[in-house]
Amino acid sequence: MIHGYSEDYLDRVMRNLGKMFDLALRQEGMDADSFEKFFKESFIAKGIYKGDVFILIGKSGQEYLIELLDKEIEDIDPLYPPGKEYWVGYVLGYIQWYWYVTFDRIFKAISLSELMGLYNPYHEADISKITDLVGARLDRNGILKRKRKELGITQKELAESTGISLPTIRAYEQGELELSKAQGESLFRLSRTLHCTIEELLLG
């Protein structure tokens, strides 16, 4: 599985996002839909995706929000244990790292409001449960089908051109197999046939 940055930074990023979302949604009372749009287009979201170390560990969650809103924000009302606002930021950090997709793509699969609505019962479950749920919606292998249809070729023709078996092509398109786990030679053949880069295939 390919990730955007070292797992060594992951816990810090998750806690920072948890704090930022808690401050924005609970303390500052920002609307979830508005903050979703604001965040996914921000330098914070883009920096995390790109693995910018200064963004990953150089700032706190409070500092994230101060820079995003361009105003002083004090952490005056911390909630213990944290609630759904903290949880949603925390799990978003993990989901983005695990699947290595942009936050914009995550929110196209599931809105911030809907994700918050899953706090019960998912906050008591292992984080892999919510990660798998979102992953199923991401359709990470969708690019294979999109690129194939753009070129006007069938699954059988793609299989013949790449030397990859038809059942395997079908499994990739149906999400039964992950492209990220494909052998390098297979990825090279697919990228050459579909006129795209290997990175595009992996990132969807």
Image (cartoon, helix red, strand yellow):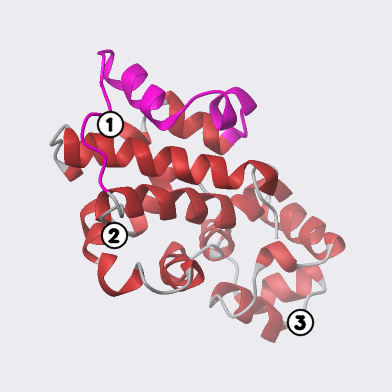
The amino acid sitting under disc 2 is: Leu
The stretch of residues the image draws in magenta is 50-79
The amino acid sitting under disc 1 is: Phe
173 or 7: nearer the eye? Answer: 7
Residue 189 is tagged as none
Look at 54% across and 66% down and name the residue there: 145
Q: Which residue is mark 3?
A: 165
Residue 8 place in picture, x, y as percent? 69, 44
Q: Is residue 102 visible?
A: no
Task: Report the side of 98 relative to 70 (left or right).
Answer: right
Q: Secondary structure at mark 1?
A: helix
What is the spatial separation of the Cα atoms under label 1 and label 3, in whole angstroms?
44 Å
Q: Which residue is mark 1?
A: 38
Q: Which residue is mark 2?
A: 115
Task: Report the side of 28 relative to 53 (left or right).
Answer: left
Look at 57% across and 50% down and name the residue there: 97
Where does the N terminus fall, quadrant-wise?
Answer: bottom right
- Whether the residues at callouts 1 and 3 have beta carbons within 8 Å, the answer is no
